[in-house]
Image (cartoon, grey):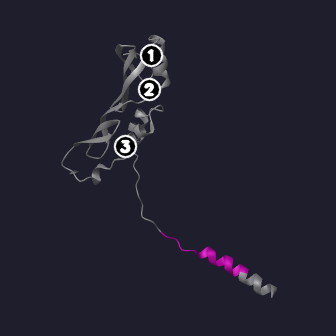
Amino acid sequence: MKKLILGLLVLGFTTQFYAQVIALPEIEVHAMNYKYLKNVDNSAAPVNVKMLEQHVANYDLKSSDFYEEAYDLYTVSFYIPDGSIVAAYDGDGEILYTIEKFKNVAPPRAVINSVTKRFPGWSIAKDVYKVSYRNEKASKMYKLILKNGDKRMRVKTDENGKFI
């Protein structure tokens, strides 16, 4: 009886060594617009801004209804309630440039500290976050409306709080 159980056990393990080998077709993965995401990354940006930028980077131009191989430039607009991105793609689906504008995005701590240091007693009433991406470089700017009682003032800063 011991030999029978031991034999069945060995037979059970040896059959697993002859499992089928399935050959899968090769796929090619392109991280085409990773440079865009790397350059426009803003850790202080809200989730909806980051998600829209991710959507722009992952957009599959070649599977869209209006794609034709004859054209070299495609302009696609993306919208959310707080802002928009206009992106230009080449014929292969790579991002050439973008123009981004978002309203009421909380500025990063560096911008807030810079504004309160230079303009004590003033508060940020409205803000607009603008990003311009071209040639694998992004410029980020905050347009702020400051208020102090009945007075209003417009200022511009970069993402580090440097006034423009």
54 up-or-down from 153: above or below = below
- Of residues 76 and 20, the one nearer the viewer is 76
Amino acid type shown at disc 3:
Ala
- Of residues 130 and 20, the one nearer the viewer is 130
The magenta stretch is 9-22
Assess disc 1: are there few (<14), some (14-19) or many (≥20) residues with their C-alpha within 10 Å of its C-alpha.
many
Q: Let me know if residue 107 is in the magenta part.
A: no
Assess disc 3: are there few (<14), some (14-19) or many (≥20) residues with their C-alpha within 10 Å of its C-alpha.
many
Q: Let me know if residue 21 is in the magenta part.
A: yes
Amino acid type shown at disc 1:
Val
Assess disc 2: are there few (<14), some (14-19) or many (≥20) residues with their C-alpha within 10 Å of its C-alpha.
many
- Residue 112: x %, y % from top left: 47, 20
Q: Which mark is residue 107?
A: 2
Please identify the dominant SS of the magenta region.
Answer: helix
Q: Quadrant of the C terminus?
A: top left
Amino acid type shown at disc 2:
Pro
Is residue 141 visible in the rendered image? The answer is no
| Location of mark 1 (residue) | 115
- Residue 161: x %, y % from top left: 44, 19
